[in-house]
Amino acid sequence: MTAVTTRRKRSAGELRALAEEGARLLADASADEVVAWAARTFPGTLGVASSMENAALPHLVSQHAPGVDVLFLDTGYHFAETLGARDEVDFSLDVTVRSILPKLSVAEQDERYGPRLHDRDPGACCRMRKVEPLREALGDYECWMSGVRRDESERRADTPLVTFDETNEMVKVNPFAAWSADDVMSYAMRNRVPLNLLLSDEYPSIGCEPCTARVEPGADPRSGRWQGTSKTECGIHE
Ligand code: SF4
């Protein structure tokens, strides 16, 4: 499918007011009700971020907003399984996958900053390959959605269902905020949505290949991300 995006029509002030209204109306709403509200309120200006770990969120949103844009940050460092999941999502769901590329290819980044920047300065690498490209892509939308959940980490424990994203000056919706990992997997299995094959190979949380390790059963699912560093987030949810 061809990506069709609509530029923002409302001001940051109007979007802030909508975020506040949504947060009030949907304080105790289900994920389905939250997605339905977002689809109604932001037709054509809604983007869904997906790491292609599983396609539960793109599937749920596509039920209310067929053809919705799904934003995948194509860092150049993904596992083959993740790229396979992206292609399967594009093929099997009623969504429009947009692969968002960084300004520099991996080879260009290596040339300018030296090889394996992710080992020496993962903050800079994530900024150039994830944070800045996403920020630029979000300029096309009034609302973006993520699959962030409160139970993933202490830093995510206060994740709201609906909020105003001050950095990107738009509405941000986290329909799965109150869900557990089991809730997401139950939804995925019930609806037969594409899953990243690495989930069944001891990778419960999947990012770029150089920064993602296998996790022992029972350990913190995010403990395989940026192992050996103090980094716990790529920065797109801050
Ligand atoms: S997760 Fe690692 S490889 Fe991917 S953008 Fe961040 S630092 Fe770079």
Image (cartoon, rainbow, N blue to C red):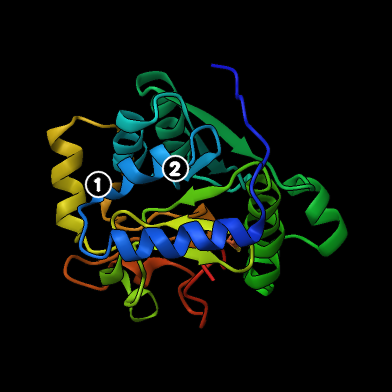
Please say if 90 is above or below 23: above
Q: Which secondary structure lies at badge 1?
A: helix
Number of marks in the rendered image: 2
Nearest to the observer: residue 76 or residue 136: 136
Is residue 35 something that shows in the picture? yes
For residue 132, what is the image quadrant?
bottom right
| Label 1 or label 2, whichever comes before in sequence order | 1
Determine the residue positioned at 20% across, 53% down: 30
Q: Residue 231: x, y in percent?
A: 52, 77
Q: Residue furthest right?
A: 112
Please say if 96 is above or below 28: above
**Where does label 1 land, which residue?**
33
Q: Is residue 175 left or right of residue 87?
A: left
Nearest to the observer: residue 16 or residue 110: 16
Is residue 197 something that shows in the picture? no
Q: Residue 207: x, y in percent?
A: 46, 55
Q: Amino acid at mark 2?
A: Thr
Please say if 207 is above or below 1: below
Kindly report the distance in space between the C-alpha atoms of the residues bearing marks 1 and 2.
12 Å
Residue count near mark 2 (Cα–Cα under 10 Å), binned few <14, some 14–19, many ≥20: some
Determine the residue positioned at 21% across, 50% down: 184
Mark identifier at residue 41? 2
For residue 160, what is the image quadrant?
bottom left
Quadrant containing the C terminus is bottom right
Q: Is residue 216 left or right of residue 227?
A: left
Q: Residue 27: x, y in percent?
A: 26, 65
